[in-house]
Amino acid sequence: MNTSNKLNQKRRNIFTDLLMKKLLMIFLLIFSIALVISNILVVQEDEMVVIKQFGKIEKIIDKPGLYFKLPFIQNTDLLTKKLLNFEVQPITAFSKDKRNIIAVSYAIWKITEPYSFIHNVANIENAEALIENSVQTALRQKYSQLSYIEIIRGAVSGKDYNEEITAEVNRQLHNTGIDMLDVRLKRTDLTAEDEEMVYAAIKSEREKIAKQHITIAENEASQIEAEADTEAEMIISQAHSAAEEIKGKADAEAAKIYAESYNKDPEFYKFIRTLESYKKTMNDKTTIILPIDSPYTKHLTGN
């Protein structure tokens, strides 16, 4: 009886050992699979993965695909290749003539040098803090070089000096791995009294420019009118000269015709000329006293 019990106990121990070994193997298998899966890196097209080993950058993966990192001794930081838009907190800047400007802006940036970014910035939150400080500094520096009127005129016309400000921000962010693509003003606000004063000054300046344009236009109109009058007088003078010339030629031709007619028949010519003089000197109420030897009398009496 004791022998049978011992045999059964031994069999149960063997079964238990086998079961524990199988469970351990299954656990190890599951753990290995989980470990492998957790250390597989899937890098997307718009991502960069920084692999660190013992706190130092081992490598940077910037091409899409599947990669593997060593478990426990390597960790990763994920960086994006996308353009990032950051809303900068509004600031109050002072113009060259010591007036208040409230500027609201935003920045468009991206990470171009991941080594420098990780070493000098570390993460997106730190990058945004640096960008905000740099943009605000650049805005204050630029506005301090401009008068109040110049700033407002630029805002009205759409010129916000973004190229100069962007260049200054990039200079300040040198060696951070950040590339500032654009800094833009969303709006420029004024205090109520400053707004009224500045727009009154702008209106006055515009009126002055308008008067200058009107004066120039009037001068040009006067010059055009004078040139037109001169040209008209020249044309009239030329026409008068041409008319006199034509009249002279006509008179000469008439005299020639009269001369030819006289040479052909002097008596008939005298008769015609006498009739023409009658026509010019006599009307219905004319009373004429003629001497007997007058040419008129001869023609009238037929002698």
Image: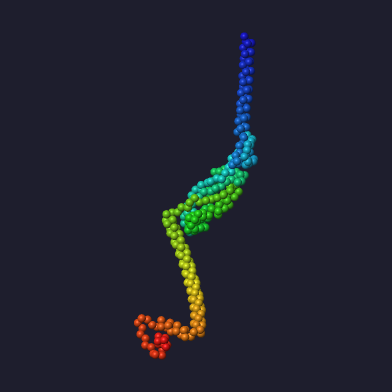
Q: Percent position (x, y) of residue 196? A: 42, 57
Residue at screen point 61% across, 26% down: 27
Depth order, front residue of 219/300: 300
Furthest toward the top, the residue is: 1
Residue 201 visible here: no
Residue pictured at 53% horizontal, 48% vertical: 107
Q: Residue 270: percent from the left, percent from the top?
A: 46, 85
Closest to the observer, 25 or 288: 288
Query: Which quarter of the rendered picture does the C terminus lie within?
Result: bottom left
Q: Image quarter for residue 10?
A: top right
Q: Position of residue 49 (x, y in %)?
A: 61, 40
Residue 262, given in percent of the width and then of the height, sits at 49, 84
Work out whether 86 lies above or below 65.
below
Compared across the picture, whether 302 is left or right of 110 comes to left
> Is residue 282 shown above or below 49?
below
Q: Quadrant of residue 279?
A: bottom left
Q: What residue lies at 63% left-to-right and 20% top-to-bottom? A: 18
Quarter of the image with the N terminus in it? top right
Q: Residue drawn 50% across and 81% down? A: 257
